[in-house]
Amino acid sequence: MNRRTILGTVAAVGFGMITSVAGADGLPALEKKERYKVGFAQMESNNPWRIAETKSFHDTAESCNWDLVATDAAGSAAKQVSDVDSMIAQGIDVLFLPPREEKPLIPAVMKARAAGIPTFLVDRSVDSNVAQAGEHYVSFLGSDFIWQGQQVAEWTLENFKGEKGIIVELEGTTGSSPANDRRKGFDDVMAQHDNMEIVASQSGDFARDLGRQVMETLLQAHPDVNIVYAHNDEMAIGAIQALELAGRKPGEDVLVVSIDGTRDALQAIIDGKMGVTVESSPFFGPLACEVMNRYAEGEEIEPWVQVKDRIFTADNAAEFIDEAY
Ligand code: GZL
């Protein structure tokens, strides 16, 4: 225990506020128990990825001895924060939180810590200038979104046949870590190639219909687009619908590239309408169980438990479509 933690613990005991013995770095510890009351504060269920993630937690609960308290904030960061408040009031032992946006969910992280509840961020993270793994929350369990964007860019450079790439980018939820990092990963690679130009970049909120609407609008302004980069498959599928409605032929006169690895995306690749989708696995339940148990055993958890993702193209989409969500 460091000096700050000892003082903190002494103060808590002094005021009769002891909630949990803090860990070595001021993090709340997790007492090893027969069963755990586990909070999972989901942000929304607006696409197959979110639904698959939520199902993964429910499917893991019994085998991991969880009494699961699961909520759904229906796309509202403010409600996601209040959902965490209510879980704290219910006395959860541990919190798994996929923060919808990097800044508005900081209060939820800080409140859980102050209540002596260890928090694991899953699938998305928070602003690291304000809250850090190992200090304010235990760890971030998730993919490398910058790597995902880089892989999409590299595949596009290798497979785009035209002279000049006129790129439209459909961004994920504004202020979310996957949107920020998938943009950085892709854009930084493309900035090194003079024959590649990103002419428009706009959020479709990771949703199929909004992605379609945004693509319809951007097509009006940029009829010469020949590459569409979507931060997730749902928006890519929406974009394909918009392109076909406008008489374009995705896979022939426009290259559509994306991230997630959903069943519909793998089918679009098999049908020749999408070029690549970089996997971003939603199946966090088993990983959450494993890391929580390690923490309860007193192990120090690495600040980022990184999920390794695959790349799906025409070479392997048919092989993996049966396991896709
Ligand atoms: C990625 C996750 C993203 C998916 C989208 O970990 O946060 O959110 O890529 C989902 O499909 O909405």
Image (cartoon, rainbow, N blue to C red):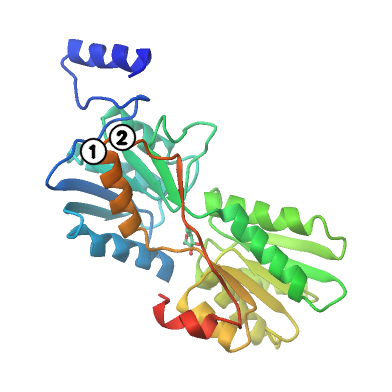
Percent across and percent down for residue 170 are 63, 64
Residue found 41% across the figure and 56% down from its top? 75
Quadrant of the image containing the C terminus: bottom left
Residue found 58% across the figure and 89% down from its top? 271
Q: Is residue 176 visible?
A: no
Earlier sequence position, callout 2 versus callout 1: 1
Front residue of 198 and 24: 24
Residue beneath label 2, please? 112
Quadrant of the image containing the N terminus: top left
Q: Is residue 188 left or right of residue 105?
A: right
Name the secondary structure under disc 2. Answer: helix
Q: Is residue 68 left or right of residue 46?
A: left
Q: Quadrant of residue 246?
A: bottom right
CA neighbours of label 2 inside 10 A, class few (<14), some (14 to 19), many (20+): many
Percent across and percent down for residue 21 are 23, 25
Residue found 69% across the figure and 71% down from its top? 228
Q: Mark 2 and mark 1: span between their CA atoms?
A: 7 Å
> Of the residues shown, which amino acid type is indicated by label 1?
Ile
CA neighbours of label 1 inside 10 A, class few (<14), some (14 to 19), many (20+): many
Question: In this view, which residue lies farthest toward the left?
Answer: 34
> Of the residues shown, which amino acid type is indicated by label 2?
Ala
Residue 220 higher or lower than 40, as above or below: below
Percent across and percent down for residue 204 are 57, 63
Percent across and percent down for residue 46 are 41, 66
Front residue of 296 and 244: 296
Residue 147 higher or lower than 24, as above or below: below
Answer whether labels 2 and 1 touch (C-beta < 8 Å): yes
Residue beneath label 1, please? 88
